[in-house]
Image (cartoon, rainbow, N blue to C red):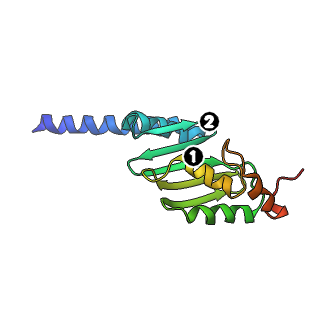
Amino acid sequence: MKRNSIMVLVAISVLIVSACGRADSYGKNGQVAMAQSHESMAGSDHGMNMQEGNKMEKVGEKAHAMVQLPTIQCEMCKNSIEQGLAKIKGIESVHIDLEGKMGHINYDGTLLKLIDIEQAIAELGYQANDVPADPVAYEALPECCKVPQ
């Protein structure tokens, strides 16, 4: 009985120490370290996929994408993208960080892929990661939503 108790305490101690070590490794790049941790734990099919300039996490059906939005200029841009994406089947939530020019999108990974989201944003007139804005949609944007020349 005493031996089992000691084994349980040792196991708990190991878990606590390893958890503390992981928390310290997050640092400034917490999301990247966390992504690598998820990938190593989940395997290649359901882990974190890192692509240039964006991050996409897929665990089962739920997925999260971080999309760079270099051409957004104002609150109207933010609202247009959030409202436009909210209409798409499979999009669960959208938050646009105007100051950071970054979109955070939660979606159903069985219905959509990152490129689908990027294309939808481009069709609204905004660049999404490396996908350029649709020129016709961009020209139709209000002046405040266009990149200053």
Q: Which residue is at the far right?
A: 149
The residue located at (90%, 50%) in the rendering is: 149
Residue type at numbered disc 1 = Ile
The residue located at (59%, 48%) in the rendering is: 66
- Nearer the observer, 80 or 73: 80
Task: Give the image location of residue 103, x and y in percent.
Answer: 62, 53
The disc, 1 or 2, on the residue closer to the chain's N-terminal end is 2
Q: Which residue is mark 1?
A: 115
Query: Residue 11 vs residue 51: left or right?
Result: left
The residue located at (42%, 39%) in the rendering is: 47
Query: Residue 9 vs residue 83: left or right?
Result: left
Task: Give the image location of residue 123, x and y in percent.
Answer: 67, 55
Q: Which residue is mark 2?
A: 52
Callout 1: helix, strand or loop? helix
**Crowding near pointer 2: few (<14 within 10 Å), some, many (20+)?**
few
Task: Give the image location of residue 37, x and y in percent.
Answer: 44, 36
Residue type at numbered disc 2 = Glu
| Closer to viewer: mark 1 or mark 2 | 1
Is 50 above or below relative to 105? above
Q: Quadrant of the N terminus?
A: top left
- Nearer the observer, 71 or 98: 71
Between the residue at mark 1 and the residue at mark 2, the CA separation in whole angstroms equals 13 Å
Q: Which residue is at the far left?
A: 1
